[in-house]
Amino acid sequence: MIRQAEEVINASSKPVILIGGGARGASHMLDEFAERIGAPIVYSLNGKGVLPETDPKVMGGLGLLCSKPSSIALRRRRSQQFQNK
């Protein structure tokens, strides 16, 4: 599963990280990962506050929290998705 995720990420020209509440407690690793792959971060309602909104990698939220930068980041991503099946 990790290898499959790595292949999808490496094949993507514009990856985006979508986080939820499950990312709490992993903010340092998430920050390093986003920096390493050059990906913006978009959050769900439950993911709000995992990383500071002042972080330049954090584009904003989805749904009711949707910001223009987060909407643009998601529209520009490739159609490839990694799904846990």
Image (tube, rainbow, N blue to C red):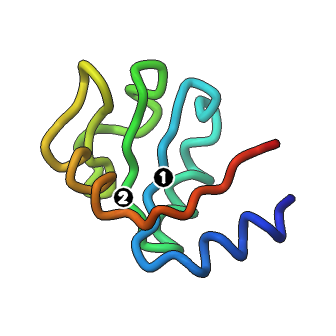
Please say if 53 is above or below 46. below
Please say if 37 is above or below 74. below
Image quarter of residue 67: top left
Distance in Å between CA atoms under marks 1 and 2: 6 Å
Residue displayed at 65% across by 70% down = 8
Q: Residues within 10 Å of mark 2 (few under 14, many from 20)?
A: many
Identified by mark 1, the residue type is Ile
Name the residue tied to disc 2.
40
What is the secondary structure assignment of the residue under circle 2? loop
Please say if 52 is above or below 57. above
Q: Position of residue 45 (x, y in %)?
A: 40, 20
Q: Position of residue 77 (x, y in %)?
A: 38, 63
Q: Position of residue 3 (x, y in %)?
A: 83, 70
Identified by mark 2, the residue type is Pro
Name the residue tied to disc 1.
17
Please say if 42 is above or below 44. below
Q: Residues within 10 Å of mark 1 (few under 14, many from 20)?
A: some
The answer to whether 75 appears left or right of 9 in the picture is left
Residue displayed at 13% across by 43% down = 68
- Residue contact between numbered discs 1 and 2, judged by CB atoms under 8 Å: yes
Residue displayed at 47% across by 28% down = 47
The quadrant of the rendering that contains the C terminus is top right
Q: How many marks?
A: 2
Residue displayed at 46% across by 68% down = 35
Q: Position of residue 12 (x, y in %)?
A: 51, 75
